[in-house]
Amino acid sequence: MSFFKRTFLAAAVSAVTLTMASVAAQAQDVTIRYSNWLPPGYFLWEKVIKPWMADVEKVTEGRVKFEVLPKLVGTVPGSYDTLQDGLADGSIVVPAYTAGRFLPHEGLELAWLGDDMVKRSAAMWHVYEKYLAPAGVFGEIKVICVFPTTTAQVFTTGAEITSVDSLAGVKLRSPGQQAGKVIEAIGAVPVTKPISEVYELLNGKVIDGVATNADSITGFKLDGAIKVANYLEGGLASTTTMLGLSKAAWEKISEADRAAIDKISGAAFAHRMAIEHHKNQQAAMDKIVANGTKIIKVDPAIIAEYKKRTQPIFDEWYAATEKAGFKDARVMLEEFEKVYAETPGN
């Protein structure tokens, strides 16, 4: 056999081998080890995350599957580190549980930014993609979606907001640092704890109430201790929630399958979440009312005063983020408000 024929055959065999290896890599099965800390039956798990997992399996033709681990890996506040360190492959993460770590995103949790979840979810994903992702915020993991909870209202064991000073000395669980500052500005005492610990805190009379959304009140079985729901239009705060994967797990997935997963994540996931949030919020409020909880719609004049009191918190966040090197805080929040206003709502 001539040198040229031998060379051609060797090259041909090499090309076939590489092609087969590439196909094998593209067809590689990946199992995502998911660490779940949400309670059984909670709508976020049942109505959004589990259906998304099923959709992932479908769009990847079964190559990407999920294994829900038998117990939480690490801690709820440490879920981001669990993913960053590869101790689990997927989890829900609440950035506010590690106050100050993700400063540029914290402005999206501030008060009065709007109650409509479809509008708010669209605005949040938009500014995440345009401002936060390029700045490397949450850059240590693969972000499937960043989305808001329904806005926090003031649920108490008895306190009613009938004047600007009604909450003086009232201890309220806060979902995070920025919300805690808002709670303090309106006269209450913030106690920052994960929602998973609030049941015991309420029953032990360690706190007098909680700044959270209605679906968390029913989802975490808090409605038995709550007697008053104080509704503040625009929302006292909104906690950012994330669905994330470890980068190591994400990189095991073929490029084609990653693209397919991205199509059902991001904005699509945020919209699905918003719709389910809206449904669950209404169902939760109906249940809370049926259980005898008193609903107080806070006077707009009181809210106007609260807005004045909380404006320094916005100014402080603008200054802190600029000092930390993130120069787009003000324009990001302005664009958030613009997208919120332009997006069709529920």
Image (tube, rainbow, N blue to C red):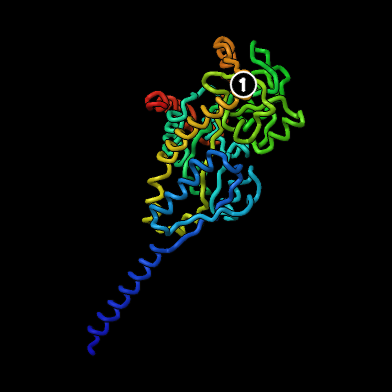
Front-lying residue, 282 or 169:
282
Q: Can you give x and y, in whole percent of width and height, for residue 136 in the image? A: 49, 43
Q: State whether residue 75 appears in this view.
A: yes
> From the image, which quarter does the N terminus lie in?
bottom left
**Position in image of residue 196 (x %, y %):** 65, 38
- Identified at 51% across, 33% down, the residue is 148
Name the residue rendered at 65%, 20% in the picture.
Answer: 228
How many discs mark residues in the rendered view? 1
Left or right of 38 on screen, residue 7: left
Query: Is 9 left, or right, of 95 in this rendering?
Result: left
Res 322 visible? no
> Residue 21: x and y, percent?
38, 70
Q: Residue at x 63, y 44 (%)?
A: 76
| Residue 62 vertical placement versus 100 (above, below) | below
Question: Tag 1: residue type?
Answer: Ala
Left or right of residue 205: residue 148: left
| Badge 1 density bin: few <14, some 14–19, many ≥20, Cα 10 Å | many
Residue located farthest toward the bottom when viewing the structure as drawn:
1
